Image (cartoon, rainbow, N blue to C red):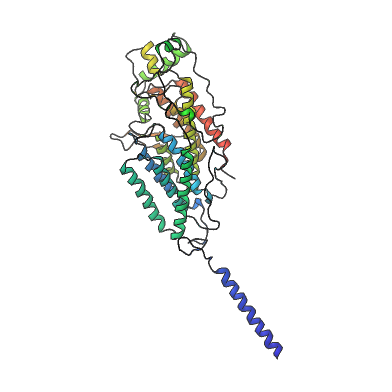
Amino acid sequence: MKKRVLQAFLFVSLLSLINSSCKKELKPEADSLKGNKESSAGPSGHLQQTKTFSSDVVVKWLDMQLNLLRVPLAPGATSTAADRAQGYSGVTAYEAVVPGMPSYQSLYGQLIDFPAMPSTEPGKAYHWAASANAALAEINRKLFPGASAANKTAINNLEKTLETQYASEVEPYTLARSIEFGKEVATRVFAWASTEITPNTCSYVDPTAAELLANPSLWIRTSPAAPAVNPCSRYTRFFVPDVSEGTALAGPPPFSTAPGTAFHNMVLDVYNKKKNATPDQLASAEYYRDAPGYPGGGSFVAIYSQLLVKAQPTLDVAALGYAKTGMAQHEATLVCFNNKYNYLLIRPVTYIKQYIDATWNTHIPTPNHPEYPSGHSTIGGAVTAMYADIFGENFQITLHTYDYLVPALPPRSYNSFTEMVTEMANSRVFGGIHYQATCDESMIQGKKVAMNILAKIKFQK
């Protein structure tokens, strides 16, 4: 009898122990962030990946950046502000969400001098759209310190509006953690940007009469009262090691003023194409002249936003694409301008007025930097190659970049990214500011820059 009582007691005790153990396993892990208790799994019972969020946050910050880049620029900003902003913003967006992309990795150890990024807390949930929002708000504040008071307020308002939206989707402690992570990413990326030393003491001085007599192909400023654009680019740090490898240009033909020579024919081609351009060809030149509008690469900010709106990818694709297009824009700009100040080639308008037709003029203003290579063609070649990598080459889109102007510029439609970049490049010839050979070679150069980035940077693990 005693033996049965003892067995019953032990059985009840064992059941109690098992029940107690099970309750301990089911009890949420106690943790604290700013005094809040939380589950490591988050509200939906699992750790959400970046791909579960929409690309809306990237679109909204691209559109905000367009307000910051519209002509006239903020005090202290240069005509290459868009290219620099795209590069650093793209890297920031990617690093702010890549921990939620299991097959992908940080750019730490791959980009030149790039610092280690903050670590996420293991097993803790993150709202990756909130992280991207905080990161892009912070990096734009830091990249555009001279923004108008209205634009600074707009940055704060957009950040707060999205933050309020996300607050209804996730617990306060997860939101707070995500925001903190995103801001720290932006802080570290900007610290890296701040070590990019571009001296502002270098300048370009037009060649003397004696120098022009010895070498009449030398470029002289088409706007003598204004400084040359971006002559210090050769001192600016690239993102990607050896990104210019294999991108050397063939070079222009030997300078000559004699009719029938390769150089003279190249210039005469510009003269005739501008004179015989169709209304649509001239419209393309006006569409890509950038002012009124956006300086330098600002149009690519607008294009990427419109591509995302049409394609509607998830946040992981949008952030990866932002990094790729931003890096391509930044690197191609440096490659282009380094070459410009090496070749120092005369602009068509200078040659034509001096040797062909003194009354001739361009359809759009000639930028105040050397002719060879073409910025729109090199940068366009790089960025559109990245568009094709992300969305596929035969992507159809109608651009409405300049609908906001009064009067608006009619939209431009394309069936592929090759068609898009070809029109961008040719528009500079119809506008009278570049040689056709320059634009053709520059597009190839830009594509090589993009291919180097894709070959040298390992986004996936």
Which residue is at the far top?
Answer: 258
Q: x%, y% of residue 314?
A: 48, 48
In this view of the protein, can residue 314 be seen by the observer? no
Q: x%, y% of residue 112?
A: 54, 37
Quadrant location of the C terminus in the rendered image: top right
- Position of 108 with respect to 217 (left or right) is right
Residue name at image x 37 percent, y 43 percent: 64
- Position of 115 with respect to 350 (left or right) is right
Which residue is at the far front?
Answer: 201
Q: x%, y% of residue 37?
A: 48, 65
In this rendering, the answer to whether 123 lies above or below 112 is: below
User: For residue 164, what is the image quadrant?
Assistant: bottom left
In this rendering, the answer to whether 23 lies above or below 350 is: below
In this rendering, the answer to whether 134 lies above or below 343 is: below
In this view of the protein, can residue 153 be seen by the observer? yes
Name the residue nearer the viewer: 369 or 234.
234
Q: x%, y% of residue 402?
A: 34, 35
